[in-house]
Amino acid sequence: MIFKVYYQESISEVPVRENTKTLFVESESKRNVLSKIAERKFNVEYVQEVKGAYLEYEQQNENFKVLEI
């Protein structure tokens, strides 16, 4: 499954919507995604499974890359 992770780069600062970044991770579950990116010290806001038409839409973006951590 592919998950979209919404995060802030700094864990010490208050989250600001305009600074939210995203990345895509291939994993078996949300829990695995969180454990895989824990070492990066991100302030994770939300993890969402991406599938179907939404995945197809995201794949059309030239910046779409799936991390296999």
Image: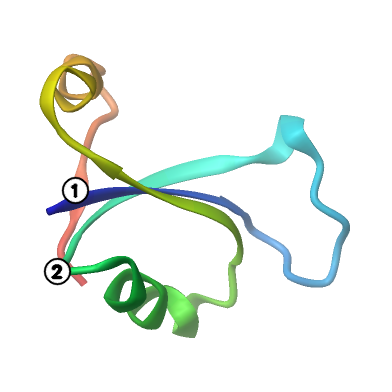
Contact, mark 2 vs mark 1 (Cβ under 8 Å)? no
Residue at point 64% right, 58% down?
Answer: 9
Q: How many marks?
A: 2
- Residue position for label 1: 66
Q: Residues within 10 Å of mark 2 (few under 14, many from 20)?
A: few
Left or right, 43 with reference to 66 = right
Q: Which of the two residues, 16 or 51, is positioned nearer the viewer here?
A: 51
What residue sits right under mark 2 in the picture? 28
Badge 2 marks a residue whose secondary structure is loop
Which residue shows up at 18% across the image and 27% down it?
55
Q: Amino acid at mark 1?
A: Val
Q: Position of residue 48 (x, y in %)?
A: 38, 46
Rendered residue at 75%/34% (across/down): 17
**Res. 28 image quadrant:** bottom left
Residue 63 or residue 42, whichever sits in front: 42
Which quarter of the image is occupied by the N terminus?
bottom left
Residue 60 percent coordinates (x, y): 17, 14
In the image as oriented, which residue stretches furthest toward the right?
A: 14
Closest to the observer, 21 or 53: 53
- Which image quarter: residue 45? bottom right
Which label sits on residue 48?
A: none
Identify the mark nearer the N-term, 2 or 1. 2
Q: How is the image coloured?
A: rainbow
| Front tag of 2 and 1 | 2
> Please, what is the three-letter code of the amino acid marked with disc 2?
Glu
Query: Which quadrant of the figure has residue 33?
Result: bottom left
For residue 12, above or below residue 60: below
Badge 1: how crowded within 10 Å, few (<14), some, or many (20+)?
Answer: some
Viewer-nearest residue: 20 or 45: 45
Q: Say above or below: 47 vs 57.
A: below
Is 32 displayed left or right of 42 in the figure? left
